[in-house]
């Protein structure tokens, strides 16, 4: 091998958007590692820069173009001092949606590839290098061969809490959403592949796994890799994962109300490793708006599902996503959303002003809601949601909670972990050696976005690996 080939190359990856993009970025690094690429945390001087982008709302897409503007000077500086060139790649959902248009708008972009083709990165990089900067590469296919079959078996991701993608794409076509166009049709990975990846993570110290999918509870993967036709539901997969020794906590996101089945509800009752916290986006509390959104559920369906889940596990708490100012949303519709929030109660939530996305049906609907009305509704909704979040956090005072310690705090001897409900919990009097332990804390303090606690004597379980 010539010297240049074997030398380490610097890779800078910036991730925008959802947790699936975080997972994809890690997998891109796994694909590029055998080619000598090692991740760095500064784009200056990098041999390759990948922007793994999000197209969900207008603001998310715009960020990519301002970052590309800033990259221009790094690319020029590198080339000016006689080094090899910097390959600039745009990946993810903006890449999928904009394709060649992106290259036209931004001449510094050498490579554009979507969420379903990054397993082909070695070929793309070889072509880009051979072409000495003249061949620009676009790969926004939805290949028939599945990406997951071509990714390296080894996952380099490490940490006490890790992500595993189990499902990708979406067939729901909510009228506001770009995901079905950028991620493609729904696909579920075979169950045994997921178990293998989970075991690998656990062997490297992971204690908590979050299963990812755009529609994670639509999961229906082949149960046997060589295919005897039997499919696993998400409920079944959770039970299989729970058998892995050393895996202590399991979460999954994002779910659709329509796909919450009885088997999944039963898993919340029967499988203690499944955490009692569920992100279940409702988007709106108005049946009229839900129908225009093509959500395939109404407010009553949502309330009924929540009731069943809470009957299965009374400790279960919910978070959600909301959109205000969807086309045609009246004051009365918005009041219905507030009422649903009051009835259900959420301990955490994300809420957004409706953002028209090119190519989606809602962007062409009449009666777009004026910006100031959207802003006013968002502020009112967020005030109510914040009230509920603070009330929940305050109600935690005096309770004991198991906390997975996963990072150092700002102060000496301070550690931070996550409660079963994903609240960050701060604790003093511990050391770095305690990272990765699950300890029982008595909650003594509540803030809007975090808790403080004290160690309950004699609590805690050890890490998987030293
Ligand atoms: N797969 C997830 C959603 C991914 S997008 C699901 O099915 O719930 C995350 C959130 O972004 C959505 O739940 C929605 O609340 C919000 N969102 C999506 N498209 C939007 C748009 N055009 N304008 C405003 N918010 C939007
Ligand atoms: Fe988008 Fe709806 Fe699919 Fe969620 S279910 S990804 S909001 S189309
Ligand atoms: Fe964004 Fe694509 Fe995720 S649009 S939210 S990065 S699926």
Image (tube, rainbow, N blue to C red):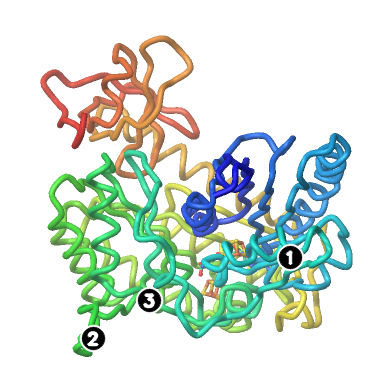
Where is mark 2, residue-wise?
227
Disc 1: CA contacts within 10 A as few (<14), some (14-19) or many (>=20): many
Nearest to the observer: residue 3 or residue 278: 3
Which of labels 2 and 1 is toward the front? 2
- The answer, for residue 349, to whether it is visible in the render is no
The answer to whether mark 1 is within 8 Å of ligand 1 is yes
Image coordinates of residue 422 in percent, x first then y, are 38, 42
Corner quadrant of residue 150:
bottom left
Residue 188 - label: 3
On the image, which quarter does residue 415 sit in? top left
The picture quadrant for ligand 3 comes to: bottom right
Q: Residue furthest bottom?
A: 229
Query: Is disc 1 in contact with disc 3, using a CB cutoff of under 8 Å?
Result: no
Residue holding disc 1: 355
Give the camera-side residue of 421 and 13: 13
In three-dimensional space, the C-alpha distance between marks 1 and 3, rounded to whole angstroms, equals 29 Å
Return the residue found at the far front.
2
Q: Quadrant of the C terminus?
A: top left
Out of 226 and 221, give the one closest to the viewer.
226
Who comes first in sequence, dot 2 or dot 1? Answer: 2
Q: Which element is circle 3 on?
A: strand
The secondary structure type at the circle numbered 1 is loop
Residue 362: x %, y % from top left: 72, 79
Nearest-to-viewer mark from 3 and 2: 2
Element type at mark 2: loop
Q: Are marks 3 and 2 in contact (CB under 8 Å)?
A: no
Residue in the image at 76% along x and 44% along y: 84
Give the crowd class for mark 2: few <14, some 14-19, many >=20 residues within 10 Å. Answer: few
Residue 281's spot in the image, x, y percent?
48, 64
Q: Earlier in the sequence, mark 1 or mark 3?
A: 3
Q: How many marks?
A: 3
């Amino acid at each position: 091998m010539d010297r240049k080939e074997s030398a380490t190359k610097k890779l800078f990856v910036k991730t925008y958007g959802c947790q699936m993009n975080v997972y994809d970025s890690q997998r891109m690094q796994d694909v590029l590692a055998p080619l000598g690429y090692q991740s760095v945390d500064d784009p200056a001087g990098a041999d390759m820069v990948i922007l793994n982008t999000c197209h969900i709302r207008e603001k998310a897409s715009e960020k990519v173009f301002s970052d590309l503007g800033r990259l221009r000077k790094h690319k020029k500086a590198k080339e000016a001092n006689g080094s090899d060139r910097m390959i600039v790649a745009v990946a993810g959902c903006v890449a999928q949606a904009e394709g060649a248009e992106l290259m036209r708008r931004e001449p510094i972009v050498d490579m554009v590839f979507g969420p379903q083709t990054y397993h082909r990165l070695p070929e793309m990089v070889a072509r880009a290098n051979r072409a000495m900067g003249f061949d620009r590469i676009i790969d926004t296919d939805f290949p028939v061969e599945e990406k997951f079959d071509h990714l390296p078996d080894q996952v380099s991701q490490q940490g006490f809490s890790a992500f595993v993608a189990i499902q990708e794409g979406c067939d729901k076509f909510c009228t506001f959403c770009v995901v079905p166009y950028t991620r493609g049709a729904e696909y579920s990975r075979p169950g045994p592949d997921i178990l293998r990846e989970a075991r690998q993570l656990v062997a490297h110290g992971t204690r908590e796994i979050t299963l990812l999918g755009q529609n994670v509870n639509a999961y229906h993967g082949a149960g046997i890799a060589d295919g005897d036709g039997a499919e696993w539901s998400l409920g079944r997969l959770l039970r299989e994962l729970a058998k892995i020794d050393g895996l202590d906590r399991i979460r999954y996101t994002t779910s659709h109300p329509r796909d919450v089945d009885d088997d999944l509800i039963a898993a919340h009752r029967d499988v203690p490793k499944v955490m009692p916290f569920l992100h279940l986006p409702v988007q709106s509390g108005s049946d009229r708006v839900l129908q225009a959104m093509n959500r395939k559920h109404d407010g009553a369906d949502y309330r009924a599902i929540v009731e069943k889940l809470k009957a299965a596990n009374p400790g279960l708490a919910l978070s959600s996503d909301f959109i205000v100012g969807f086309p045609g949303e009246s004051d009365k519709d918005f009041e219905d959303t507030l009422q649903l929030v009051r009835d259900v109660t959420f301990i955490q939530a994300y809420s957004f002003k409706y953002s028209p996305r090119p190519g989606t049906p809602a962007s062409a609907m009449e009666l777009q809601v004026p910006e100031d009305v959207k802003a006013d509704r968002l502020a009112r909704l967020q005030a109510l949601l914040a009230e509920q979040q603070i009330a929940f956090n305050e109600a935690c005072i005096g309770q004991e909670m198991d906390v997975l310690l996963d990072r150092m705090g700002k102060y000496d001897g301070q550690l931070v972990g996550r409660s079963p409900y994903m609240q960050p919990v701060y604790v003093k009097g511990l050391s770095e050696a305690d990272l990765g332990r699950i300890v029982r804390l008595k909650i003594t303090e509540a803030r809007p976005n975090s808790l403080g606690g004290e160690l309950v004597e004699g609590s805690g379980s050890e890490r998987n690996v030293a």
